[in-house]
Amino acid sequence: MPTTVDGFEYMIAASSAWITDYTGAGGNIIIPSSIEGYPVTRIGYAAFENNSNITSVFIPSIVSDIASYAFDNCSKLLAINVDSGNGNYSSNNGVLFDKSQTLLICNPAGLTGGYVIPSTVTSISDWAFAYNQLTNISIPNSVTNIGIYAFRNSINLTNITIPFSVNNIGGGALNYCNSLTSISVDSVNINYSSLAGVLYNKLQTQLICYPAGINGTFTVPNSVISINSSAFEKCTKITGITIGSNVVTIGNKAFFACTGFRLRCSGSFVS
């Protein structure tokens, strides 16, 4: 059985305490600096994931490692604050960053309205905005990398603009965004482009992501020769797709969880 103190489940390893789960009452919580006399140095993998009770978290200076998905899908979380003496992490208006604030790690899922990413940021971490409730996110020209699933399940996000500086967009970054009707790309971006709100590579030979909020039918442009994995995943509002004979590659799960439409491929219908 896990060992628990004040709702924090933990384990002792390498002469330090690692937080592995939280089962407490929630609200405004403070990560302890020590447990059983051992310094708390790590917040473990998915330690607070899916917790709908916590509203804010304070991380002490002693914590040196925050594992992936630690605060994912915490629907009421409004702020992640970090002690200013922490050597690895920092916070800005309740958002979690690395110390230099060049890597945006986690935007609390309970925040609403709009958010402007600071111009110090060069990389948006995997899952950084996943499950958030923001309607608008502004990405500065300093950002070069957008991690996998970075905006996944951002259910209120209606549009997003990719600046000229971005040279990598991770797989599934904009999937399951049910209100998203437009992905725009700065015209001088050398890696990506958009057409009618759909995301492509620069030459529009590769269809990367179709916004899930668009209604109606869609015809894949003749320039496209490949459709990315998960490109239309969970696009439940689309009623029909026509794929021309130039398409030679369709990625894994390209049409996964698309309900209520038929697929037309070079004149033949496939259910």
Image (cartoon, grey):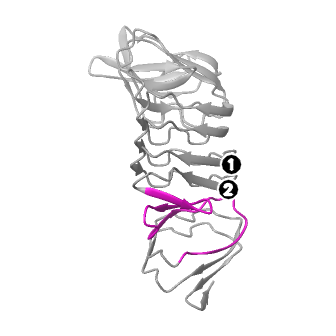
Q: What distance separates the C-alpha of mark 1 from that of mark 2?
A: 6 Å
Residue 182 lies left or right of residue 202; in this view the side is: right
- Residue 201 covered by magenta stretch: yes
Look at label 2 and name its amino acid.
Thr
User: Is residue 204 visible to the viewer in this orientation of the structure?
Assistant: yes
| Residue 181 - label | 2
Residue 136 lies left or right of residue 87; in this view the side is: right
| Residue stretch rendered in magenta on the structure | 192-221
**Which quadrant of the structure image shows residue 131?**
top right
Look at label 1 and name its amino acid.
Thr
Query: Percent x, y for residue 119?
Result: 47, 29
User: Please, what secondary structure does the residue beneath circle 1 have?
Assistant: loop
**Which quadrant of the structure image shows residue 55?**
top right
x 47%, y 38%: residue = 141
Instruction: Give the residue at mark 1.
Output: 158
Nearer the observer, 17 or 152: 152
Residue 161 lies left or right of residue 136; in this view the side is: left
Circles 1, 2 touching at the beta carbon (< 8 Å): yes
Query: Percent x, y for residue 125?
Result: 44, 38
User: Looking at this rendering, what residue extends furthest in the left direction?
Assistant: 14
